[in-house]
Image (cartoon, rainbow, N blue to C red):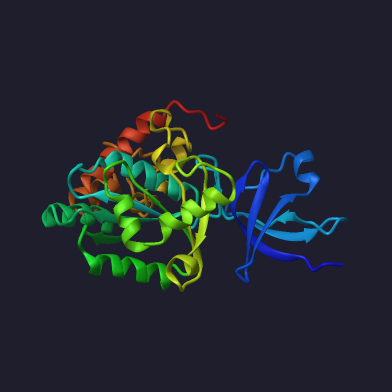
Amino acid sequence: MEEIKQGIVVSSDGGLYEIYMGTGERIACKPRGRFRHKSMRLLVGDRVTVGFDEQKNPVVEEILERKSMLIRPPLANLDLLFIVVAAASPDPIYENIDKLTAIAEHNGIEPVIVVTKSDLSDEKAEALADVYRRTGYQVFIAGTSDEEGKTLLKNALLERYSGRIAAFAGASGVGKSTLLNGLFSSLCLKTGQVSEKIGRGKHTTRSVNLFPLKELLGEGEGFLADTPGFSMLDFENFNFFSLSDLPHNFPEFERQLGLCKYTKCTHRKEDGCAVLEQMKEGRIAKSRHDSYCTLYELLKNKHEWD
């Protein structure tokens, strides 16, 4: 009997999945028939066991426990979301940044802020970085020609965030592609190779693929998720969690829970609100509170069972 091994799903196409094994070997296979009968959906990012069927063809036997699961984009076990925002041109839209951080928090994904285009305005870059440093998030500043900033970010991927699955998100024009090309010069080539290998047009942007850092950088453990999905989130119909979850998805608010004068404080305008006191003292950025209030209005009519 062939040995059952563990691997991670790095790409999929039409029911065929590519599994990256710990040895660096890649195996293309389908899941067992019971996946279909039990309506089990295999996602890129899933850690799985691979065995063999009666004809000795490799098959996915089982999905190991998931740490997280996103529907849009379809991705499992994402650990880190690097949110790329420009200091200027375009100016940052704090509400959209904070929606992404809240979605990440709700799904157990660590947000990391990357400020680009600092060469256009050091002052604006530092002001933007300060907003998110006050939340407790890790912040990196990387201008277009800032090799030191890119090196710090790359070293963090190899050391602090070693062994994890990371994705980069950013609105159009913030310099995400330029940043990724600076960090991973072979990424475009790898993307093209995957598209050609699985018979998909090179310009298709709907798929999710994982690229081992060892292949991109020549060293390191972990994976980079190449996906456009985080720029396609439906912000107009923001219903990713309930109103009661909202303060827990703003870490600087969560640290104040239980300290307000009123037990049912909404943290918007009440007297004796610990969150508002922190904002008056400059420990919480006003833009973060503004985003919280906007999301509160969006979520207040959502039922727990929706």
Which residue is depicted at the point 21% across and 52% down? 128
Q: Is residue 63 toward the left or the right of residue 150 in the image?
A: right
- In depth, the one of 206 and 123 nearer the eye is 206
Residue that appears at 35% across and 38% down: 266
Horizontal placement of 294 versus 194: left or right? left
Locate the C terminus by quadrant.
top right
39 sits left or right of 111 in the view: right
Inspect this view and state whether residue 135 appears: no
Q: Place residue 147 in its image quadrant.
A: bottom left
Residue 67 screen position, x and y as percent: 58, 55
Q: Is residue 112 visible?
A: yes
Location of residue 72 in the rendering, given as x and y in whole percent from the top left corner: 50, 39
- Find residue 193 and report its horizontal and vertical position in percent: 51, 54
Q: Nearer the viewer, residue 272 or 174?
A: 174
Q: Along the horizontal axis of the image, is 148 left or right of 12? A: left
Count of numbered marks:
0
Q: Position of residue 257 (x, y in %)?
A: 38, 50
Q: Compared to 295, does 212 lie above or below?
A: below
